[in-house]
Amino acid sequence: MSHQYPGPQQPYRGGPAPYMPPPPPKKSMSGLAIAGIVIGGIFAFIVVIGFIGAAAGGGKDSNTDGKGSADKVSSAPEAAPAEKPAAKPAEKKEAPAAPVKVAAKKTVFAPGVLHDGGAYTSVRVTIMNNSDKKISVNPLYFTITDTDGTKHTAELAVDENQIDTVDLAPGENISGAVTGKGSFTAKYVTYVDGLLGEGVRGNVS
């Protein structure tokens, strides 16, 4: 004989409700979780306070003083720096005059009392004393150099227009002929005061 087990009880009309097991009890939060929540809340509060302070500080003008009054900033454009005056060109200073100046030019030989009939070449010389002391002039103080580089000493009394033997005071000048023996083309004349010292040259024009 087989046994039949009863199946799950079916509610019946008007009968009691079937048995329901009670829900599991809720677990209480641990102390670490509660501490973490509290610390997180404090940190969030500090962050919010920081944002509020930064926003309040950014609203102030950076050019304000301690009383909160803004410094006045001039809106007028800055004046352009004054241009420096153009430098004046340096004035050319004239070179001081040479103490002695010699000028020479070609001239025609004019036979004098001592002319012996030979060929001679004369140059008309002008000598100027620009120094502060007197200088001596003598035909023998002159030499003539020709275009070949040959130097000719002065011949005395062969040209009737020979330069005189004189002393020139400061500012004075004298002109006369200086004559060399032979036929040549004169290039320049050299004067030496007293036959000694530095020569002064004058090109023949």
Image (tube, grey):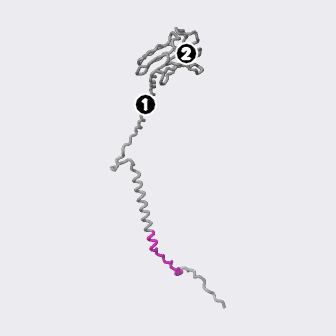
Q: Which mark identifies residue 165?
A: none
Q: Residue furthest left?
A: 67
Q: Residue at x 43, y 67 (%)?
A: 39
Q: Secondary structure at mark 2?
A: strand
Residue 44 located left or right of residue 18: left
Main secondary structure of the magenta stretch = loop
> Amino acid type of disc 2?
Gly
Of callouts 1 and 2, the N-terminal one: 1
Residue 140 lies in magenta, yes or no?
A: no
Residue ID at (45%, 69%): 36
Label at residue 85:
1
Nearer to me, 139 or 66: 139
Residue 14 visible, this angle = no
Which residue is nearer to you in this view: 22 or 79? 79
* Stretch of the chain drawn in magenta: 15-36
Quarter location, residue 82: top left
> Where's residue 149, x and y in %?
58, 21
| Towards the viewer: 94 or 56 | 94
